Image: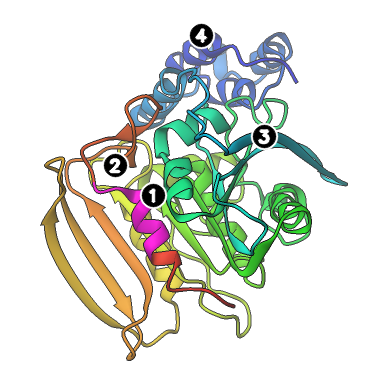
């Protein structure tokens, strides 16, 4: 696959040539796509119209994300490069090992970046390594390859990448399993979290591997099965998609959800769909609290708990926030420093779930 030509994709998008633009975003050579596209024009060369919301999404994808220096590593800690390979391919990842790790079993968090991001950028923006240093847990950051997706998005919308034992989910679960095999990990405290495309992939992981992941964190993401291909992915991002029922009697995967109510990339209604899917069939008591973060951002925090008071689902609505990690560092991309600290809140929530 070729390297993405964002200018060409944007030009084609503005001309209404969506099929060609999307093909370029998937990494196909521009020349091949243009040749194919000439045969797709309407009568007398008329071009297909594209909704302005989709144009806006494509334009933002080209502008968001930026190179980030590696996050600082505490004395005695390490941030190492690793990779995992199976029949679905190979994915690199970075692993943060805090200075307090002494070989005793500790939690593991799989952090899945958003489109155009990298492990370094995501670690910098979320500050999760700082939390890991304070609380002593391992953090693995898988890296999406540009060959798999030209924008480095996890392919959460592709049917083959939504199933256990197949595609990208097998690679991501394999990374977690490799870390468990090579380090001392409490297998009852393995979690997945992500932003945007990474959040949608984390939801998919929780649904496909409930025996591996004790809980998931979803920031600005979408429900499992919200899309089956790229066109339905754009539709879900624009207007949401109803959650798909879980097959059979499967455990409820504890989930914490963050979403800005001014998100122009992933419609905030998707947070409600993620929450509805997570609590499906569970009898839970609900309480809501309004508050303001130290940075001045208003939020609504809704907790769905068992009769014993154990939170099974939390939903944070960030009032006035866009498509960005709440409480993150401005040194990374897609962050909203004013918001409540999503990384710390996720770890607080995860601590309630130490077995499957």
Q: Dot 2: few (<14), some (14–19), or many (≥20) neighbours within 10 Å?
A: many
| Mark 1 / mark 3, whichever is N-terminal | 3
Which is in the foreground here, disc 4 or disc 3? 3
Overall secondary structure of the magenta stretch? helix
| Relative height, residue 227 to residue 27 (above, below) | below
Quarter of the view holding residue 94: top right
Q: Secondary structure at mark 2?
A: loop
Q: Position of residue 269 (x, y in %)?
A: 32, 54
Q: Dot 4: few (<14), some (14–19), or many (≥20) neighbours within 10 Å?
A: few
| Mark 2 / mark 1, whichever is N-terminal | 2
Region of the chain picked out in magenta, as a range: 340-348
Q: CA distance from mark 4 to mark 3?
A: 34 Å
Q: CA distance from mark 3 to mark 2?
A: 25 Å
Q: Position of residue 165 (x, y in %)?
A: 78, 59
Q: Dot 1: few (<14), some (14–19), or many (≥20) neighbours within 10 Å?
A: many
Q: Are marks 2 and 1 in contact (CB under 8 Å)?
A: yes
Disc 3: which residue: 80
Residue 327 circle label: 2
**319 in magenta:** no
Q: Secondary structure at mark 3?
A: strand
Disc 1: which residue: 343
Which is in the foreground here, disc 3 or disc 2? 3
| Relative height, residue 175 to residue 120 (above, below) | below
| Mark 1 / mark 4, whichever is N-terminal | 4
Q: Check the picture and name the quadrant holding the C terminus.
A: bottom right
């Amino acid at each position: 696959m070729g390297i993405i030509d964002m200018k060409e994709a944007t030009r084609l998008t503005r001309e209404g040539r969506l099929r060609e633009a999307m093909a370029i975003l998937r990494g196909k050579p521009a020349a091949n796509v243009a040749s194919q596209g000439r045969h797709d024009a309407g009568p007398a060369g008329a071009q297909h119209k594209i909704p302005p919301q989709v144009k806006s999404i494509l334009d933002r994808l080209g502008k968001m994300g930026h190179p980030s220096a590696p996050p600082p590593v505490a004395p005695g800690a390490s941030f190492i490069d690793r990779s995992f390979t199976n029949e679905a391919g190979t994915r690199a990842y970075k692993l943060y090992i805090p200075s307090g790790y002494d070989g005793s079993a500790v939690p593991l968090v799989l952090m899945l970046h958003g489109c155009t991001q990298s492990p370094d950028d995501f670690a910098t923006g979320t500050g999760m390594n700082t939390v890991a240093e304070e609380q002593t847990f391992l953090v693995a950051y898988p890296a999406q390859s540009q060959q798999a997706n030209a924008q480095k998005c996890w392919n959460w919308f592709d049917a083959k990448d939504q199933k256990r034992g197949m595609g990208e989910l097998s690679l991501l679960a394999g990374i977690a399993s490799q870390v468990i095999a090579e380090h001392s990990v409490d297998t009852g405290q393995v979690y997945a979290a992500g932003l945007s495309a990474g959040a949608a992939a984390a939801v998919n992981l929780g649904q496909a591997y409930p025996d591996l992941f004790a809980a998931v964190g979803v920031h600005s993401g979408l429900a499992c099965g919200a899309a089956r291909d790229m066109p339905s992915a754009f539709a879900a991002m624009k207007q949401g998609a109803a959650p798909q029922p879980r097959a059979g009697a499967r455990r409820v995967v504890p989930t914490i959800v963050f979403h800005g109510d001014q998100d122009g990339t992933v419609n905030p209604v998707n947070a409600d769909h993620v929450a509805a899917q997570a609590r499906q069939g569970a009898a839970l008591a609900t309480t809501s609290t309004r508050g303001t973060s130290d940075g001045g951002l208003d939020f609504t925090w809704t907790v769905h708990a068992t009769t014993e008071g154990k939170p099974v689902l939390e939903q944070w609505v960030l009032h006035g926030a866009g498509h960005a990690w709440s409480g993150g560092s401005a040194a990374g991309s897609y962050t909203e420093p004013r918001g409540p600290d999503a990384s710390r809140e996720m770890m607080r929530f995860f601590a309630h779930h130490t077995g499957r």
